[in-house]
Image: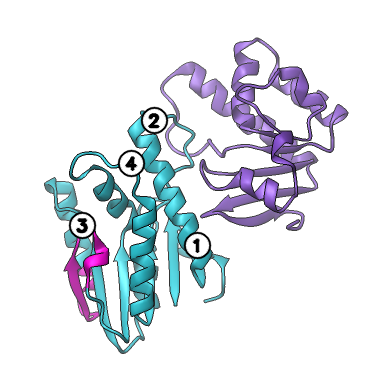
Amino acid sequence: MLTLITGGSKCGKSHIAEQLLENVHCEKIYIATMIPYGKEAHAAIERHRLLRAGKNFTTIEKYTNINELDIPEQSAVLIECMANLCANEMFDSGFDADVSGRIVNAVKKINKACSRLVVVTNDVSRDGIEYPEETQLYIKNLCHINRQLALIADNVIECVYGIPVMLKGEL
Amino acid sequence: MILITGGAYEGKTEYAADFLKINPDEILDGDTCPVQKAFSAVCIKNFQKLIKRLINEKIDPIDFAHRLIRENNKLTIITDEIGCGIIPANKSDRLWRETVGRVCSMIASESVCVIRLSCGIPTAIKGKLL
């Protein structure tokens, strides 16, 4: 079962994602995709760690190629977040414009392996600004990934200041 | 009129073609089409860019929208949602963003149906899904 959670910055997406998996009793795996570059990233990672504390997640830090992960059956997986993963895949070693297909396939593979998957993503295309070409391509890739995942997802949630707005399915 | 909106790359044009059954050849691009074609078009995409061109060509976008509503009320308009985020520092960008907001509010108010796409998923925020 796949749930996709989107929304703007700091709108409570992670909290909703963790809540969804709160009463799940199987092994819980948290795939952290944010590369700990610099102070802000360290602070964000620490804040998320505290949020998850006591919720029995096993954290796996994996910044690219999440298809390589060995996901046990009967596990619940939370991927956080797609915006970082997409950026890492595109910009981490040189520049790769063509990433959406392989990211979607990796998520499909994980979704098949585990019993419950929650993917946290981000809404990045609603400010009307024309960015330089590489950034524009990043926005396009992330939107494409979001749309492909929304197609196969059971639930799609847009989070607005902590309120889950259902775009697809029912909670 | 029908208004289809949402962020960039949300699948708005695909929605118009797949669900409203608009022939893709009949979807004009507001970035490049002759401005006057809007009054006889079936569908215009990138309407936000057409508005930018109106401003650049010194055509009053509000008058233009009034005339569009009067003369082509079967039109389907596809436009990016561009009003979120920080107010642009540049004056012409501010004017454009505000004008898109005003004009699209006029269009939405005249539309039987307003669809907003997020993650490619359409939600009818006015009227019913078609």
Mark 3 vs mark 1: same chain?
yes
Callout 2 amino acid = Tyr
Q: CA distance from mark 3 to mark 1?
A: 22 Å
Q: CA distance from mark 3 to mark 4?
A: 17 Å
Whole-percent x, y for residue B100 in the image: 61, 29
User: Which chain is the one coloured purple?
Assistant: B
**How many neighbours does mark 2 have within 10 angstroms: few (below 14), some (14-19), or many (20 or more)?**
few
Q: Which residue is mark 1?
A: A150
Q: CA distance from mark 1 to mark 4?
A: 21 Å
Q: CA distance from mark 2 to mark 4?
A: 15 Å
Which residues make up the magenta segment? A50-69
Q: CA distance from mark 2 to mark 3?
A: 24 Å
Which comes sooner in the sequence, label 2 or label 4?
4
Callout 3 amino acid = Tyr
Which comes sooner in the sequence, label 3 or label 1?
3
**How many neighbours does mark 4 have within 10 angstroms: few (below 14), some (14-19), or many (20 or more)?**
few
Q: Which residue is mark 2?
A: A131
